[in-house]
Structure formats: structure tokens, C-alpha cells
């Protein structure tokens, strides 16, 4: 009984995290898209050049850091929920959770390295 | 054997919203677009990682993407539509589930059990979101076609 209550509480926290990261994503993703949009006056092809892309990463590190954190947590947690709902891994739910944590760690490390390395 | 077929039938039916209300359609589209976006996020992170490897690696990545031809723009258009729908529907869900907006007042369940959470305002919100997303998706398509030099 105690473990069931703990499990429910854990999922509630995960849902809360999903809502918070979703709200962060709406704001930060809008900024990200505006930087690449026609509103900047820069043609689409020009936004894909090395100079423009690295310039954005250098000057908006906080925005991209926040975007990385929110997108990875929100996305992988969503995938974890779908996996648990579809697969019903009663005894191996911990494996799905572990895989989700590993994926979150991997993508956060990959994105963080990019943000730090591009100077 | 029976367990496997029951699992498969549950999996398939969870993706088919025909015969259900707009909320169920929203649920299915929200999940499908979410999975598309997660795939794009992974690819985008690997793509952006190439920036840390220098201009040569970035140029190679861009030329590999451009070699896909119009498929690249079609993919981006699908991602744009997914992001627009997932974001707009997500805002509606947060308003509903976190703040209780558009949910309606609870009533005694009387046959035919029409849920107050799917009242006129809720349906209006769903269709407004759909219309706005379709307009913005069309605009994104035109922008991408202009990027291709088609228009």
C-alpha cells in the first residue's frame, strides 16, 4: 500500500514537471522560432549558415539552455508515459523509467556540450 | 496468445479515434505529434552538435540535408504543423487541467451522460485551435516553399 501511494505521488510530480516544462517551452520556443523567422528579415537559407547559427547559440545561451532543459524533460517524460500506457510493463516499469533517465541524461549532455563548445 | 492479440488490439484502437468525440481526436493527435516532435528533437540536437565540430562538419550536415531535396522541406512542414498543434492544444490542456478553465460545472450524471467538460465553450476552443493551427501551418508551408525558391 505504501509503495502504491509513493508511486502515485511520483507520477503526480512527473505530471507537474510536464506542465511546468510545457509553459516554459511555449515562451522559449517562440523566441527560438522568432530568431529564425522572416520577422528577422534574414532569408531562410541564410539562417542555416554556420555564422548565423553559431551567432544565435553564442548570444542566446540562456534561452537555448532553458529550451534544451524543458524540451528534453518534457519530451522524454512524454515518451515514458506513452511507453508505460501502451506496454503495461507491470513488473518492469522501473526499466522504462531508467531508460527515460538515461535518455534525458544523454540528450542534456549532448546539448550542453554544444552550448559550451560553441564560443 | 490471447494476451498478445488483446494487447495489439488495444494498441491499435488507442490510435483510432473514429466514432469518438473531439476530445479523443485531440488526445490521439496530441500523442502522434508529440512522438514526431521527439524524433525531430533528437535529430535537431545531433544536427546542432555539428556546430561544435567546426564549419566543415556543419557544411557536410547541411549538404546531406539539402540532398534530400523537397523531402527536407516536407519534413520541416510536418514538424511545424506538429509543433503548432501540440503547443496550441497543450495550452488548452493546461488551462483545462491546471486552472479548470472551460471545464464546466459538475452535474449529476443523467443519461445520455453528456460530459460538461465537453460543453459549447470547450468545443469552441478545440475548433478555434484547429482553425488557427491550420492557418499558421499553411503560412509555414508558404514560407518553406519560398525558402525552396518555388514561390
Image (spheres, coloured by chain):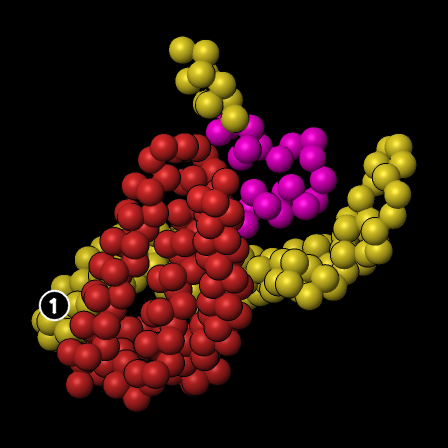
Range of residues picked out in magenta: B11-31
Q: Residue furthest front?
A: A2
Q: Quadrant of residue A112?
A: bottom left
Q: Quadrant of residue A111?
A: bottom left
Q: Where does residue A85 sit, x and y in percent of width and height? A: 47, 38
Mark yes or no: residue A29 visible: yes
Residue at (44% x, 44% y) in the render:
A3
Q: Where does residue B136 sit, x and y in percent of width and height? A: 58, 65
> In this orientation, which residue lies closer to the viewer: B71 or A90?
A90
Left or right: where A66 falls relative to B18 = left
Residue at (62% x, 35% y) in the render:
B17
Q: Where does residue A4 sit, x and y in percent of width and height? A: 48, 42
Q: Where does residue A37 sit, x and y in percent of width and height? A: 44, 77
Chain A image colour: red
Q: For numbered disc 1, what is the local secondary structure?
A: helix
Left or right: where A55 falls relative to B136 = left
Q: In the picture, which chain is yellow?
A: B
Left or right: where A100 falls relative to B126 = left
Point out the image quarter for the N terminus of chain B.
top left
Residue at (54% x, 50% y) in the render:
B30
Per the image, the residue denoted by label 1 is B57
Q: Quadrant of residue A61?
A: bottom left
Amino acid at each position: 500500500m505504501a509503495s502504491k501511494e509513493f508511486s502515485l505521488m511520483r507520477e503526480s510530480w512527473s505530471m507537474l514537471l510536464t506542465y511546468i516544462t510545457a509553459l516554459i517551452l511555449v515562451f522559449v520556443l517562440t523566441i527560438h522560432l522568432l530568431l529564425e523567422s522572416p520577422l528577422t528579415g534574414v532569408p531562410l537559407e541564410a539562417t542555416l549558415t554556420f555564422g548565423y547559427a553559431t551567432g544565435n547559440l553564442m548570444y542566446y545561451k540562456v534561452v537555448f539552455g532553458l529550451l534544451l532543459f524543458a524540451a528534453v524533460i518534457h519530451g522524454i517524460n512524454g515518451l515514458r508515459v506513452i511507453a508505460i500506457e501502451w506496454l503495461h510493463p507491470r513488473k518492469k516499469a522501473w526499466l522504462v523509467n531508467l531508460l527515460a533517465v538515461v535518455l534525458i541524461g544523454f540528450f542534456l549532455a549532448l546539448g550542453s556540450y554544444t552550448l559550451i563548445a560553441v564560443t | 496468445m490471447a494476451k498478445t492479440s488483446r494487447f495489439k488490439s488495444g494498441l491499435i484502437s488507442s490510435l483510432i479515434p473514429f466514432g469518438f468525440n473531439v476530445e479523443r481526436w485531440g488526445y490521439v493527435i496530441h500523442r502522434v505529434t508529440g512522438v514526431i516532435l521527439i524524433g525531430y528533437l533528437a535529430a535537431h540536437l545531433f544536427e546542432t552538435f555539428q556546430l561544435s565540430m567546426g564549419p566543415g562538419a556543419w557544411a557536410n550536415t547541411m549538404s546531406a540535408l539539402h540532398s534530400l531535396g523537397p523531402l527536407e522541406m516536407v519534413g520541416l512542414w510536418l514538424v511545424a504543423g506538429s509543433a503548432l498543434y501540440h503547443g496550441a492544444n497543450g495550452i488548452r490542456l493546461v488551462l483545462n487541467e491546471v486552472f479548470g478553465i472551460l471545464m464546466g460545472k459538475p452535474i449529476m450524471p443523467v443519461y445520455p451522460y453528456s460530459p460538461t467538460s465537453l460543453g459549447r465553450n470547450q468545443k469552441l476552443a478545440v475548433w478555434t485551435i484547429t482553425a488557427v493551427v491550420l492557418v499558421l501551418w499553411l503560412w509555414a508551408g508558404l514560407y518553406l516553399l519560398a525558402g525552396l525558391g518555388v514561390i
